[in-house]
Image: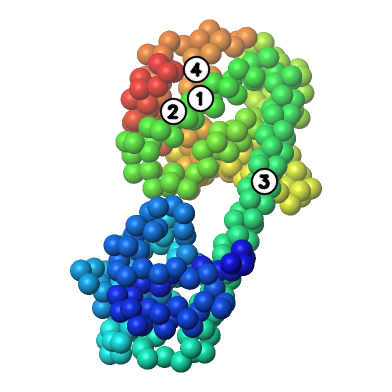
Amino acid sequence: MILDRKTIMIVDNAPADLKMTRNALARHYHVVTAPNADKMYDLLEAGALLPDLILLEVNLPETDGFRATQILKSNKLYENIPVIFLTHRGDKQDECEGLSLGAADYIVKPFHSELLLERVKRSLAVESQKKRLLSMNAHLHDIVRKQTIAVRGLQDSILTIISELVENRDDCTGEHIGRTAQMLKALIAGLTKWTAYAKELETLDVDLFIDSSQLHDVGKIAIRDEILLKPGKLTAGEFNIMKKHVEHGVTIIDRIQKQTAESDFLSYAKVMIETHHEKWDGSGYPNGLSGNNIPLYGRMMAIADVYDALTSERPYKKPYSQKDALRIIAESSGTHFDPVIAGVFPKIIHASALS
């Protein structure tokens, strides 16, 4: 036996037909025979044989060829073995039924040996091509997976470095970044569970969104120390300068996006930077957006940002209690905050580790 020959299994209960088919193929293939479906299953389940193709008579005793094929195709170990029906049943309806079950071909007896060889050769070639395509597809998936990991690593590095630059400017910012990230995780879980925003959040890349939230105050890099680090309340003029951190942040993200082809990961960050100071009633900045014109991600960042600011100590104030902070959030529902988010916000806080 030549080791690289394909293996063909012939399943036929008619000894003369079985012998004729075997003789037609034996010079070209390693041939194994079985008189019925049960013997075929025994050979397959023994584990020593996995044929490259099965020639299957339809008129088998007990379990006919159609049912035998259904059983084969329902087993993950054998579902990809091509089956050719080789039978005296030449009715077109039978042929259609056989092909509908996933058979590679349907050959009516009696046949010419040359025809059988060509049909077997063609079916094996198609199967080989399928395997090559599957292998190429798996290889491409592996390349994409590795590239995705590399790109994600680049993204994480950029996000971490930039957020550290912000943190180094402002002692409060580093802890604020971490706390708002935790808050956003809780918000995503709560809004998905308890609100109609679940559908909008279905396509959200949660990990990337949380990572990108680190940049929501990146524009503070461009704010002068005497304003950014002022221990007291800002004057109206100073506050107008502070508000420019949104514009500066958007400019920074735009510049990064222009420098790299892999910039989609910054889209979440840009939305949060530009819209987390907008208010539901349109009185926020920089663009005076209102209601649902404010992207959901910005509305989420807004409430997380304010809640953390309220419950954290600042040089110019003591922290509010959780109770008082939640009261202020509730009072600002429909003015500062999305009323849907504000409505479930206490529930989200109490259901999370942030309570």
Tell me the distance, in whole angstroms, between the alpha carbons under discs 4 and 1.
Answer: 16 Å
Residue identified by numbered label 1? 182
Q: Residue at x 60, y 24 (%)?
A: 177
Check contact, mark 1 vs mark 3: CB within 8 A: no
Mark linked to residue 310: 4
Tell me the distance, in whole angstroms, between the alpha carbons under discs 1 and 3.
Answer: 28 Å
Q: Amino acid at mark 3?
A: Lys
Q: Nearer the viewer, residue 299 or 284?
A: 299
Mark 2 or mark 3, which is nearer to you? 3
Mark 1 or mark 3, which is nearer to you? 3
Residue 341 showing in the rendered view: no
The image quadrant that residue 22 belongs to is bottom left
Mark linked to residue 186: 2
Q: Residue at x 33, y 78 (%)?
A: 15
Q: Earlier in the sequence, mark 4 or mark 2?
A: 2
Residue identified by numbered label 3? 146
Is disc 4 placed on a helix, strand or loop?
helix
Tell me the distance, in whole angstroms, between the alpha carbons under discs 2 and 1.
Answer: 6 Å
Check contact, mark 2 vs mark 1: CB within 8 A: yes
Crowding at dot 3, Cα within 10 Å, few <14 / some 14-19 / many 20+, comes out as: few
Check contact, mark 3 vs mark 4: CB within 8 A: no
